[in-house]
Image: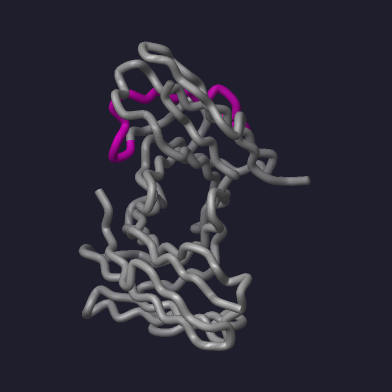
Amino acid sequence: SQQGEEDPQALSIQEGENATMNCSYKTSINNLQWYRQNSGRGLVHLILIRSNEREKHSGRLRVTLDTSKKSSSLLITASRAADTASYFCATVLGDSSYKLIFGSGTRLLVRP
Amino acid sequence: DGGITQSPKYLFRKEGQNVTLSCEQNLNHDAMYWYRQDPGQGLRLIYYSQIVNDFQKGDIAEGYSVSREKKESFPLTVTSAQKNPTAFYLCASRPGGGETQYFGPGTRLLVL
């Protein structure tokens, strides 16, 4: 089962612009993570936000979490062509397995 | 170099054939995971293992089998019972007590 839905499914922006991706989920979570996937490659962890946090920053990344709305957003500021990739949110429930439940992803294209 | 390796990069399966995908990690991580990714979709969990000689089914385990005889290895067998095996398969590992997963480069399985 897939917990999350991401919006938009695809996003095309100009280099230097900001990119915002949204993720919604269905059940209570322990934390929410964002991963990046370059075409045909494995995933790379970007950032983790816990259920008791509202906002987190890492370099050009800003993540917000609204547990009342069961939603999260990822903002990439001052985008670069190298940011072109698919971005996935993944939720972790409260059990000990630390299983990731992935959303369907947003495909980001940054035009030079 | 530390990391997760998956082999082969591409694998072809004939009708009625079982095939095994390799996943090896030298990160000394306790937990390992297998995911399936279909085109344009997020990842779905097939099996996971939190310690040697123990593993649990994920959301889509039917037609797959795994073993965890060594900490560093978690091979996945796609059996002939899996009627739609064409997909991108990703292996991941997680350190004990850690919350994020580290992914291998993936194996693309195609049916002849």
Whether residue B65 appears in magenta in the rendering, the answer is yes
Q: Position of residue B37 (x, y in %)?
A: 40, 44
Q: Position of residue A44 (x, y in %)?
A: 56, 58
Q: Position of residue B71 (x, y in %)?
A: 60, 32
Q: Quadrant of residue B4?
A: top right
> Could you tell me what secondary structure mostly forms the magenta stretch?
loop
The quadrant of the rendering that contains the C terminus of chain A is bottom right
Q: Residue furthest right?
A: B1
Q: Report the residue at 57% width, 28% height from top.
A: B22
Asked whether B25 or B89 is in front, the reply is B89
Q: Is residue B27 above or below residue A93?
A: above
Q: Report the residue at 46% width, 65% height from top.
A: A87
Asked whether B6 or A94 is in front, the reply is B6
* Colouring mode (rainbow / by chain / secondary structure / one colour): one colour
Numbered circles on residues, count: 0
Q: Position of residue A105 (x, y in %)?
A: 38, 62
Q: Is residue B21 above or below residue A59?
A: above
Q: Residue furthest front?
A: A112
Q: Report the residue at 27% width, 64% height from top.
A: A5
Q: Is residue A88 above or below residue B79?
A: below
Q: Residue furthest top?
A: B16
| Numbered range of the magenta stretch | B58-73
Q: Report the residue at 22% width, 63% height from top.
A: A27
Whether residue B92 appears in magenta in the rendering, the answer is no
Q: Is residue A73 left or right of residue B90?
A: left
Q: Is residue A104 left or right of residue B35?
A: left
